[in-house]
């Protein structure tokens, strides 16, 4: 029996957060939500989740790229898989995500199956790293 995975969704649009939550609740995960980069960053430090789903464009002082960079620079958090979510699918956007340290990139709108596959593959990768 595997332990419950803690997943943090940092997304400013409540309907997208709800869609992601409903999709991931089908698995055995503990889901937490934040609606902006600042609260998301505080939650990452407090929860130390197994995975972060992170919107790129959010209001406030921290966007998704900046939150991702903070996670990568913080000892103890730097190995948490980060999946960036964005409506912008240009090559430059993917490159910025790579530079920020993102592990994967999902372009909105994405299918629930695509979301589950990406989350599962990132979680499997971390399990393999800890084994």
Image: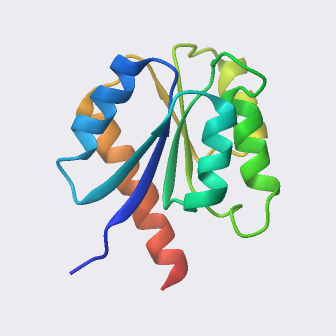
Tell me the residue at 28%/26% (across/down).
111
The part of the image, by quadrant, that contains residue 84 is: top right
Q: Of all residues shown, which one is farthest toward the right? A: 73
Q: Is residue 73 toward the left or the right of residue 10 in the image? A: right
Point out the residue furthest to the bottom here.
131
Give how far across and how far down residue 124 sits, in percent: 40, 65
Q: Residue at x 22, y 36 (%)?
A: 22
Quadrant position of the N terminus in the picture: bottom left
What colour scheme does the image use?
A: rainbow
Place of residue 87 in the rendered image (x, y in percent of width and height, measured from the top left):
51, 14
Left or right: where 85 falls relative to 108: right
Residue lying at 35% horizontally and 24% vertically, measured from the top left: 110
Instruction: Name the residue furthest left.
Output: 26
Above or below, 77 against 95 in this view is below
The tally of labels here is 0
Percent coordinates x, y for residue 92 in the rendering: 72, 19
Choose between 99 and 61: the one closer to the eye: 61
Residue 22 sits above or below residue 80 on the image: above
Quarter occupied by residue 74: bottom right
Q: Position of residue 116 (x, y in %)?
A: 29, 44
The residue shown at (71%, 26%) is 63
């Amino acid at each position: 029996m595997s332990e419950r995975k803690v997943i943090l969704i940092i997304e400013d649009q409540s309907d997208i957060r709800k869609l992601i939550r409903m999709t991931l609740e089908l698995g055995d995960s503990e889901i937490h939500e934040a609606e902006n980069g600042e609260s998301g960053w505080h939650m990452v430090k407090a929860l130390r989740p197994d995975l972060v789903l992170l919107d790129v464009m959010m209001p406030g002082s921290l966007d998704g790229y900046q939150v991702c960079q903070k996670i990568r620079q913080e000892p103890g958090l730097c190995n948490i898989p980060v999946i960036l979510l964005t409506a912008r699918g240009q090559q430059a956007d993917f490159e910025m995500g790579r530079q920020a340290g993102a592990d994967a990139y999902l372009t909105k709108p994405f299918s629930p199956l695509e979301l589950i596959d990406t989350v599962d593959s990132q979680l499997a990768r971390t399990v393999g790293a800890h084994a």
